Image: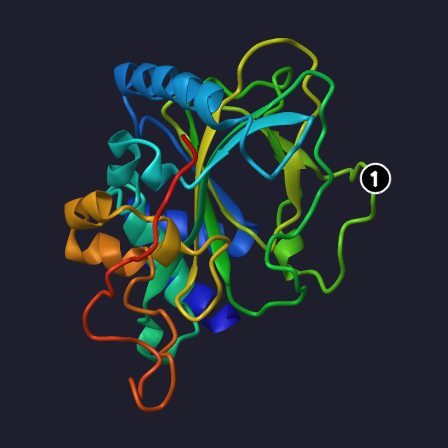
Amino acid sequence: YIKVLNLMSSKSNKSDKNLKKLLKDGYVVIDNLISKKECEKIKKITGKIYLKYSKNTKIKNPLEETIYNLHNKHSIFLKYINYKKTINLVKDALSVGSYSNSDDIIIRQSAMRNPLKGYAQQLHNDTRVVGCKFPLIIQVIYMIDDFTKKNGATRLVPKSHLLNYYAKNNKVYKNEKIITGKRGSALILNASMWHGSAKKTNEEDRWGMIYSYSRWFLKSSFNFNLNTPYKIFKKLKKEEKKLMGFNSNPPKDEFSRSSAKSKKPEIPTNYYLPS
């Protein structure tokens, strides 16, 4: 891991600097990735979707508004599956340590989140294990609203992904940072790093559009093979289908396929969505 960072130190272009910071500090912020007009459009669509589906979700969180599985809610979210302004950085970070530093990745989860007033999320590690030598999960949090110190912006502890223990409950660490930014920016982080939402003290919306990626052999949060409508599947490009994990569904048995991955994306089945 240290050798990888040392090799990167000799490079000077912006993308390499972002990768080095992401691996070393656990996060990087990139400005002006989505236009103001696009953010406004996403937010308007998000409001309608939340009103339509919030009553049916089994995930009840009284402290935030949440929408999961963006790909099957509206086509506007599809282009961010393989968004050219962020995906190469994500791929580079998640391939470090693999054979030839080149391996496939998948989307683990996509979501829109808006914390409610009074809410402060516990610092946590989304990889569920500590001491990972290389990144297992990378999250891209697009700021659809401005992230401020009063509306529940993401807080994190830099370099905590390198520690061999978890954050203590309800503890505030001296080196915590609250990541603020203008809408259209993105916070990209190693999900092993301790992170959560800062306490929201006002009524402003703070919608974040989150795409969480992992190494291909890890399990996604939801079964995309069962929750993707065929009409959406057909719209996806080859690389997008691969990122959604349609090439990495485990084989039924040794008689159907010998490899862990399939050469062609498998067509999703049995899809439905509450009306």
On screen, 231 above or below 3?
A: above
204 over 273 or under it: above or below? above
Residue occupying the point 69% across, 47% down? 124
Compared across the picture, whether 31 is left or right of 165 comes to left
Q: Position of residue 84 (x, y in %)?
A: 23, 44
Label 1: how many Cα within 10 Å (few below 14, some 14–19, many 20+): few
**Residue 62, image quadrant:** top right
Residue 213 visible, this orientation: yes
Residue 95 position in % (x across, y down): 38, 67
Q: For residue 9, say whether it is visible.
A: no
Q: Quadrant of residue 8?
A: bottom left
Quarter of the figure that contains the C terminus: top left
Would you place residue 189 above or below residue 274 in this image?
A: below
> What kind of residue is marked 1?
Lys
Disc tally is 1
Q: Quadrant of residue 253?
A: bottom left
The answer to which of 69 and 181 lies nearer the viewer is 69
Q: Which residue is mark 1?
A: 171
Name which residue lies at 70% across and 37% down. Answer: 176
- Left or right placement of residue 58 versus residue 240 in this view: right
Residue at 53%, 14% in the rendered image: 205
Residue drawn at point x = 25 percent, y = 65 percent? 266
